[in-house]
Image: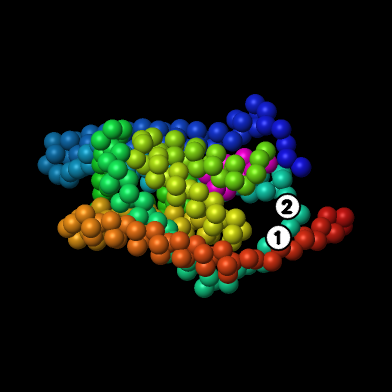
Amino acid sequence: MRKHLDIRGFFQIVIPPVIYVIVQRIAGYVVVFGMTLMSFGAMTGILRGRSFSVNLDWNEMGFVAMALAALVSIPLFLSMKNRDELQYPSDYRYEPVARWRYVYVPAVGFLMAVGTNQLISLLNIDRFFPGYEETSQTLYAMNIWAELAVLGILVPIVEELIFRAVVYERIRRYCSVTAAALWTSFFFGVYHGNMSQGIYAFLLSLLMVYVKEKYHTMTAPILFHMSANIYSVLATETALVDWVTESLELYLAVMVLSFAISLLAIWRIQEEVAPERVKKNREWHND
């Protein structure tokens, strides 16, 4: 039976991303303070005849702060997820899905990132709703290996814990899967802070909820998110997709093909992934 959403329930839903934004801000201050101390140490060293340099600009410091915030927040939101599961236990568990069936998830994530990125670029949304360019300068401020580690691994883990493991599950107490998916995706889009990323995040979030519900594990949306972010890093830092812009016809063909293959993989997930639901045995609680 679904609960009635009250003020307390609303704040329980919105507080996790708010906490993460606060952690990001604090991490930013910590990094700036640390860089200030290092700069002071560098100046002191020069005066003493020793030299070393501190060469991080504001965007690079923002990247370091993002990494620090993710590292700190992963155990925090994992604990929040576990606490929610203890407070609202399910009467059922699901048998694990065969590992090889997870191959569909990163394929969909990667290809949907290709197609959706190209669609948003084609619509030129940033021209009418600027903001992404400034954000991207921080996201892609470091070398490709640092970006793959942070954007490709740490950020997907923490954001999935926040939005799909905590926020989505809390919304599910009050409404249907479809409504919860839409509201979670809306919050996820707003969290990104600009229209281009917001639309992109909203669309991919719907699919991340879908794979979470199909596989009944957080592994699936995390893999999806990782593969999408890895594509974004590779597309930004390498010549992976430069050839696509050679002509409009080629651009459209790649976009349509990416969506088509993604839909094929989603169809296979729909047909093949159906873990058995098993009622939990709670007799041990009586001991």
Residue occupying image coordinates x 74% and y 58%: 92
Does the rendering let one see residue 193? yes
Q: What stretch is highlighted in magenta?
A: 163-173
Amino acid carrying mark 2 in the image: Ser
Residue occupying image coordinates x 55% and y 33%: 14
Q: Distance between the residues labelled 1 and 2?
A: 7 Å
Q: How crowded is mark 1: few (under 14 residues within 10 Å), some or many (20 or more)?
A: some
| Residue 287 sits in quarter | bottom right
In the picture of the structure, the residue carrying the numbered disc 2 is: 90
Q: In this view, does 98 lie to the left or right of 58?
A: right
What kind of secondary structure does the magenta stretch mostly adopt? Answer: helix
Q: How crowded is mark 2: few (under 14 residues within 10 Å), some or many (20 or more)?
A: few
Front residue of 259/233: it is: 259
Front residue of 244/79: it is: 244
Q: Which mark is residue 93?
A: 1
* Residue 45 x %, y %: 18, 40
Helix, strand or loop under label 2? loop
Q: In this view, does 269 lie to the left or right of 130?
A: right
* Residue 87 x %, y %: 71, 44
Amino acid carrying mark 1 in the image: Arg
| Residue 53 sits in quarter | top left
* Residue 1 x %, y %: 76, 42
Q: Which mark is residue 7?
A: none
Residue occupying image coordinates x 72% and y 36%: 3
> What is the basis of the colouring in this image?
rainbow
Q: In this view, does 172 lie to the left or right of 103?
A: right
Residue occupying image coordinates x 28% and y 33%: 128
- Residue 175 within the magenta-colored segment of the rendering: no
